[in-house]
């Protein structure tokens, strides 16, 4: 007595889904931790110092979180209006933040009250940063100016008013204390040198610039604005290198993975894309629940922190290798001790005969019905299944048994419309067409007598007819194209003579094109 | 063909074992079944064939237990004899010559010394009418007895053995034929006939197919072609008989059997479900489903503990009390056509061909046993008539047996042809093939041929299809299609790789195209019209420059690939070309006036090495060279082609035949004798005797090693051996060669023990030296000599 062989579900190859080292690397993160903030999270910055706390700017507060805590370690609340751009200094001691009320505040990370307050801007300040010598602060404001401030004196050093719209992003050079770059809604990026009066380089992004990023080598500059991410070569005088259009909404922020090999861009379309920085191809993609406003990576990619418009902060931590093993070797939950204590300490003796339990094979629902030759029920259970390949496989199996017609017959309006719905959805899928065309013909044979009795079924039949007509036209067009291509290929191939002994008749060789 | 008398065409294995109902012995240890011209005895627990009872000269048509001796069985055959066998020892006890071809045999406990056989009415084989006759077996001591005392019981019966059955205590016999059931009462000597109406709707669906009588009560169960089972009662009256109907089978009921106590009725049919009906509670039934193939016979052991079912796929299933399949005896499955052709698995050297539906069978030619079945289609087989099922149509092995390619197809009326190409990799761990890749719809039309490239660097498969293309599949990281080729949209029919894999020849109707698989360039075309190319074959070893082709217009051509010219051609209707993989030889089967001839030749030489006319009737379509595991050393010129490999072929009637030489038969005979001696060790009475001697011998040897004098001290015990030798019956003695040395030694001792009296001053050490001259003096008693002589010259060696 052989066991029942379950229905074979054919495996169709999935195109384009490949497992690369990148997918493995970027999938190796734990499920995200979600923290609800008071408002949209506009900025996230990691402290360069070891335990790598990070400052999250949202609404009128700046929270500092520890690497694994879900509660803020520290909170700065002394803002009169929405705070922006909380940034750590390179020694991790000071934190600067702009505010909608045009005042820039400097905090000690351990203190509570602002150490310095820089007043001078006339509108909200969205951009703040420390210069590389740690003594100056760069700010960019909605009053179209960007300024440099001295921290010890809290005085303004220089002011540049070259942009003609809001300045919403900017960064300072980590190698040169005098150089900084700003991006503005006037579509331009400007490179300034504090030693000269005017900007030294201007690049046209042709979209309102939302974010700028300097490579660690500072030879390349990345800017994002609109749906585009652009890379500029600073050493060639600001020549555009690549323009990437992989998002379908405004790209709001950029990030680099810590070794500089991968570039990340986050957008309002709720995706984070990861690019290879050698060929600028997308290697991976993260999906989030809401539009993304800010993104930051911890050193060594230990965690990815993303802030969204709905105020949710999502933190993904990298799986540690030990945890990986733990997951693999994780033991199943056993019954409680009291239940399991009987015979627990029994040690089998040497000549005990071990009786193995017969392995029970579990059959799918439709297979159970098929085993009992309940063909209509088998088709019903298969139709309930969400995966069309399973449903089609069951139909094929019924057809092989010569009972598909019986299974399709004798259905009421509701059942029939469910069946027709399935056909409409899948009949033009080239994987399923051979089976479903037979099934459709059978349905038409069986139910042609009752056409016109139900409006629902009639409507579906009309839809099916339209679908099939459209598909036939489409196939015809394709065949025409194929014919044209064949002619082109045939003319471009050189004719070759084949040596043929004892015959003067030349043998023309027409190798058939590989599919 | 007197010169070739040493090469004989012989049957080699693979005969049917499901032809007649098997018989289970009283102790349930053995199972006997008719298999061609012999009766095979299988062990019911180990599935091994224990004995092959040979003696009949035609098809064995029935087996029955001897009711008076539970160690004996009767067998009947179309050669007109009934033979009585001792199946435990495999000895023919008696032969009763009836003189008519016998179609089935019945015995009954009440009728001692009588067997009932079905013979034709007129004494010619073409007769369509059969009768059941009682044969009184004469009591006589002779080996061969003529049994002429026949008395007819029933006229006009069906020749099928299931269509008659003996009732309670042998009081009556029921036989069915067509729409008539006939019951004959032995006491009254009167038959009763019962007729059924032909089915109103569908002609002869009401016809009887089988009969079984209840062993304890007056009840007859009959099976019908429409799947009904009728239980007849009160049939000892003409009018007031009754019957009840049971219906579960949707196809014809092939076989019916009551269990010995009569509590259950077993039935089987095409559904391959064994149905067990409770007697008197017929609505309760048990099922044993999915037994593999249609059930043709059911047998029950006398104690009712074992059932066994024969199936249409040449299989016997042994079932323990209707719940558990305990053993399966599988013969070579020969379905209607061998669509995959014969192949040899390079690893196991087993013969491979399509077996039961959707499977590929691996059959060991040396052991005449099926090794295993490989499930190719991997789908539940629906046992129903008129269904289009997937069939394995092509298969090919690569040179090392690492890869197996199979093609399965299913042709459905009014629907597209479904083809799957499957590639199986050999798994060292499980020692079998594991599915690696499935290609759905590899071609748009039927695949006509398929072969692997023999080149060791690449694993490449070429498939050829009626859609006008051939495709090359290459194994890289995974299997992929490497090249699609065609020629003038002609339909390709056959393909062949050269021995080194550097050339591929594809026959496109009348044209042979030669391709280079490395660059997929068309190198040359060869053609020899008229006639489409039927078969292509490259020469091997020293003849690898030749390409042989056969065409439908009765031509065998040989091209030289180096010069691209025709070397020779000869008018011949070659149905099959087969190259020996181990030598240059090529076998060509030709059909001529309804018979097949065989020619074995080397492509480079004009004269055939061997030829045999009228090999068998009909065309030979399938043949294969199977490499021998041990090379033969035959020096005769015409038999040398059989040295490295053996040629097997299938006749039109699906008989597996082979060529055997004299040396081979001698060797086979010798090995079978050796085997028998080994077997006898396991049998208990033998073992007792032999084991005792062995122990003694070992002790003696050990003591002889430690003390050279010990041998002589034990002298008097030798006489026990002599006694045993002389007084035990000859047929339970171990082989003479085993006993002889011991026996002779025992004789020697008696004389040497006397010797010290002659020469008391002789030192013992010198005695050893001068023993050889003394042996001449030993007087073997004349009786002992006679016994020894008979043992040595006896044809029957144990």
Image: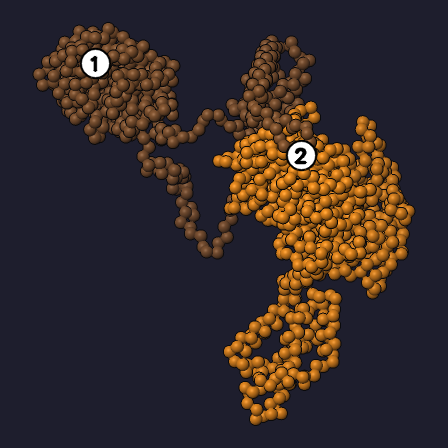
**Rendering quarter of residue B74:** bottom right
The N terminus of chain A, quarter of image: top right
Q: In this figure, which residue is indicated by the disc labeled 2?
A: A501
Q: Residue furthest bottom?
A: B761
User: Residue A447, percent across and down?
Assistant: 66, 15
Q: In this figure, which residue is indicated by the disc labeled 1?
A: A200
Q: Secondary structure at mark 1?
A: strand
User: Residue B794, percent across and down?
Assistant: 74, 69
Q: Residue at x 28, y 28 (%)?
A: A258
User: Residue B773, percent across and down?
Assistant: 64, 85
Q: Residue at x 65, y 26 (%)?
A: B489
Q: Residue at x 74, y 44 (%)?
A: B589
**Where residue B411 is drawn, which disc sits there?**
none
Disc 2 versus disc 1: nearer the observer: 2
* Chain identifier matching the brown colour in the rendered picture: A
Residue A124 versus residue A239: which sits nearer the camera?
A239
Rendered view: A27 above or below A60: below
Rendered view: B488 above or below B725: above
Mark 1: give few (<14), some (14-19) or many (20+) Cα within 10 Å: some
Rendered view: B346 above or below B445: below
Query: Quick check: A335 left or right of A36?
Result: right
Whether residue B691 is visible here, answered yes or no, is yes
Q: Residue at x 42, y 50 (%)?
A: A346
* Chain identifier matching the orange colour in the rendered picture: B
First-in-chain label (2 vs 1): 1
Disc 1: host chain: A
**Rendering quarter of residue B352:** top right
Whether residue B266 is visible here, answered yes or no, is no
Query: Quick check: A480 left or right of B137?
Result: left
Marks 2,1: beta carbons within 8 A: no
């Amino acid at each position: 007595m052989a066991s029942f062989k379950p229905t074979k579900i054919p495996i169709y190859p999935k195109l384009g889904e490949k497992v690369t080292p990148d997918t493995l690397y970027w999938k190796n993160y734990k499920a995200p931790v979600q923290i609800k903030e008071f408002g949209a999270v506009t900025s996230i910055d990691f402290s360069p110092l070891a335990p790598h706390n990070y400052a999250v700017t949202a609404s009128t507060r700046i929270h500092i979180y520890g690497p694994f805590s879900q509660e803020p370690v520290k909170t700065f609340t002394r803002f009169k209006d929405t705070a922006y751009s909380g940034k750590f200094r390179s020694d991790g001691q000071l934190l600067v933040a702009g505010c909608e009320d045009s005042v820039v505040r400097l905090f000690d990370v351990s203190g509570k009250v602002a150490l310095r307050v820089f007043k001078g801007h006339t509108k909200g300040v969205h951009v703040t940063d420390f210069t590389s010598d740690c003594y100056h602060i760069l700010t960019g404001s909605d009053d179209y100016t960007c300024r440099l401030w001295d921290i010890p004196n809290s005085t303004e050093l220089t002011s540049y008013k070259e942009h003609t719209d809001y300045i919403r992003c900017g960064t300072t050079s980590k190698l040169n204390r005098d150089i900084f770059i700003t991006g503005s809604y006037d579509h331009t990026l400007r490179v300034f040198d504090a030693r000269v009066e005017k900007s030294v380089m201007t690049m046209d992004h042709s979209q309102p610039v939302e974010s700028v990023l300097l490579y660690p080598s500072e030879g390349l500059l990345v800017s994002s604005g609109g749906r585009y991410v652009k890379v500029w070569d600073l050493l060639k005088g600001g020549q555009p290198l690549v323009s990437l259009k992989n998002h379908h909404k405004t790209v709001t922020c950029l990030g680099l993975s810590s070794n500089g090999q991968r570039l990340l861009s986050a957008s309002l379309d709720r995706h984070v894309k990861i690019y290879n920085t050698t060929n600028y191809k997308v290697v991976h993609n993260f999906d989030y629940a809401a539009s993304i406003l800010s993104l930051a990576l911890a050193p060594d990619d230990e965690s990815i922190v993303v802030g969204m418009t709905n105020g949710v902060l999502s933190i993904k931590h990298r799986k540690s290798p030990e945890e990986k093993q733990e997951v693999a070797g994780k033991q199943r939950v056993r019954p409680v001790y009291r239940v399991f204590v009987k015979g627990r300490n029994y040690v089998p003796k040497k000549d005990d005969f071990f009786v193995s339990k017969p392995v029970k094979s579990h059959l799918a629902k439709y297979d159970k019905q098929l085993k009992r030759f309940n063909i209509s029920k088998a088709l019903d259970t298969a139709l309930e299944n969400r995966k069309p390949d399973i449903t089609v496989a069951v139909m094929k199996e019924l057809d092989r048994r010569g009972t598909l017609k019986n299974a399709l017959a004798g259905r009421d309006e509701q059942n029939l419309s469910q069946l027709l719905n399935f056909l409409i959805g899948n009949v033009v899928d080239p994987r399923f067409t051979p089976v479903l065309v037979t099934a459709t013909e059978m349905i038409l044979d069986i139910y042609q007598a009752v056409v016109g009795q139900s409006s629902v079924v009639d409507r579906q039949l009309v839809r099916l007819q339209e679908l099939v007509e459209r598909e036939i036209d489409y196939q015809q067009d394709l065949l025409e194209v194929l014919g044209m291509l064949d002619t082109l290929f045939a003319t471009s191939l050189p004719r070759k003579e084949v040596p043929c002994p004892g015959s003067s008749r030349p043998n023309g060789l027409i190798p058939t094109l590989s599919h | 063909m007197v010169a070739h008398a040493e090469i004989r065409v012989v049957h080699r294995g693979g005969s049917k074992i499901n032809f007649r109902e098997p018989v289970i012995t009283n102790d349930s240890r053995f199972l006997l079944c008719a298999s061609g011209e012999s009766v095979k005895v299988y062990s019911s627990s180990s599935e091994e064939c224990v004995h092959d009872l040979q003696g009949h000269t035609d098809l064995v048509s029935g087996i029955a237990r001897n009711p008076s001796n539970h160690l004996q069985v009767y067998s009947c055959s179309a050669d007109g004899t009934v033979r009585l066998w001792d199946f435990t020892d495999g000895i023919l006890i008696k032969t009763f010559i009836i003189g008519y071809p016998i179609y089935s045999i019945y015995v009954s406990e009440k009728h001692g010394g009588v067997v009932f056989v079905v013979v034709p009415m007129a004494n010619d084989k073409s007769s369509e009418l059969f009768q059941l006759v009682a044969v009184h077996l004469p009591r006589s001591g002779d080996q061969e007895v003529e049994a002429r005392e026949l008395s007819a019981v029933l006229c006009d019966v069906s020749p099928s053995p299931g269509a008659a059955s003996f009732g309670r205590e042998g009081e009556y016999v029921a036989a069915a034929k067509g729409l008539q059931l006939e019951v004959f009462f032995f006491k009254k000597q009167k038959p009763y006939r019962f007729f059924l109406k032909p089915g109103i709707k569908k002609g002869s669906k009401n016809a009887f197919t089988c009969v079984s009588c209840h062993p304890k009560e007056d009840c007859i169960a009959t099976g019908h072609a429409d799947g009904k089972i009728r239980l007849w009662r009160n049939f000892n009256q003409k009018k007031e008989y009754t019957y009840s109907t049971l219906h579960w089978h949707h196809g014809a009921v092939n076989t019916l059997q009551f269990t010995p106590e009569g509590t259950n009725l077993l039935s089987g049919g095409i559904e391959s479900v064994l149905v067990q009906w409770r007697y008197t509670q017929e609505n309760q039934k048990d099922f044993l489903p999915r037994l593999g193939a249609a059930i043709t016979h059911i047998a029950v052991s006398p104690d009712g503990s074992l059932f066994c079912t024969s199936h249409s796929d040449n299989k016997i299933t042994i079932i323990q009390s209707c719940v558990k399949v305990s053993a399966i005896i599988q013969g070579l499955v020969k379905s209607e056509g061998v669509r995959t052709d014969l192949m040899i698995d390079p690893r196991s050297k087993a013969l491979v061909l399509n077996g039961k539906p959707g499977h590929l069978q691996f059959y060991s030619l040396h052991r005449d046993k099926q090794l295993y079945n490989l499930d190719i289609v991997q789908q539940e087989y629906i046992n129903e008539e008129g269904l289009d099922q997937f069939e394995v149509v092509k298969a090919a092995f690569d040179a090392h047996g690492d890869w197996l390619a199979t093609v399965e197809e299913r042709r459905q009326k009014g629907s597209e042809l479904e083809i799957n190409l499957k590639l199986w990799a050999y798994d060292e761990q499980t020692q079998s093939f594991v599915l690696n890749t499935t290609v759905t719809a590899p071609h748009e039309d039927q695949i006509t041929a398929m072969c692997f490239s023999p080149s060791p660097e690449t694993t490449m498969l070429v498939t050829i299809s009626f859609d006008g293309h051939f495709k090359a599949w290459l194994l890289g990281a995974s299997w992929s299609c490497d090249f699609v080729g065609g020629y003038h949209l002609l339909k390709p029919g056959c393909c062949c790789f050269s021995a080194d894999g550097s050339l591929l020849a594809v026959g496109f109707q009348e044209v042979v195209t030669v391709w280079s698989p490395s660059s997929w360039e068309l190198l040359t075309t060869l053609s020899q019209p008229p006639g489409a190319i039927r078969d292509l074959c490259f020469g091997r070893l020293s003849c690898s420059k030749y390409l042989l082709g056969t065409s439908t217009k009765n031509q065998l051509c040989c091209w030289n690939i180096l010069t691209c010219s025709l070397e020779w051609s000869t008018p011949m209707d070659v149905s099959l070309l087969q190259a020996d993989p181990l030598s240059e030889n090529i076998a060509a089967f030709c059909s001529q006036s309804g018979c097949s001839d065989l020619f074995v030749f080397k492509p480079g030489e004009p004269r055939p090495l061997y030829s045999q006319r009228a090999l068998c009737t009909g065309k030979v379509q399938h043949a294969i060279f199977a490499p021998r595991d041990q090379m033969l050393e035959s020096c005769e010129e015409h038999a040398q082609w059989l040295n490295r490999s053996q040629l097997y072929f299938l006749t039109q009637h699906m008989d597996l035949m082979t060529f055997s030489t004299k040396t081979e038969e001698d060797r086979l005979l010798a090995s079978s004798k050796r085997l028998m001696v080994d077997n006898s060790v396991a049998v208990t009475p033998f073992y007792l005797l032999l084991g005792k001697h062995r122990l003694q011998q070992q002790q003696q040897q050990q003591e002889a090693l430690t003390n050279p004098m010990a041998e002589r001290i034990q002298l008097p015990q030798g006489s026990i051996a002599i006694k045993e030798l002389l007084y035990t019956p000859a047929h339970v003695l171990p082989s003479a060669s085993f006993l002889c040395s011991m026996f002779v030694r025992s004789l020697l001792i008696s004389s040497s023990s006397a010797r010290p009296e002659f020469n008391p001053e002789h030192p013992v050490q010198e005695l050893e030296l001068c023993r050889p001259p003394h042996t001449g003096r030993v007087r073997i008693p004349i009786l002992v000599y006679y016994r020894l002589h008979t043992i040595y010259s006896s044809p029957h060696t144990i």
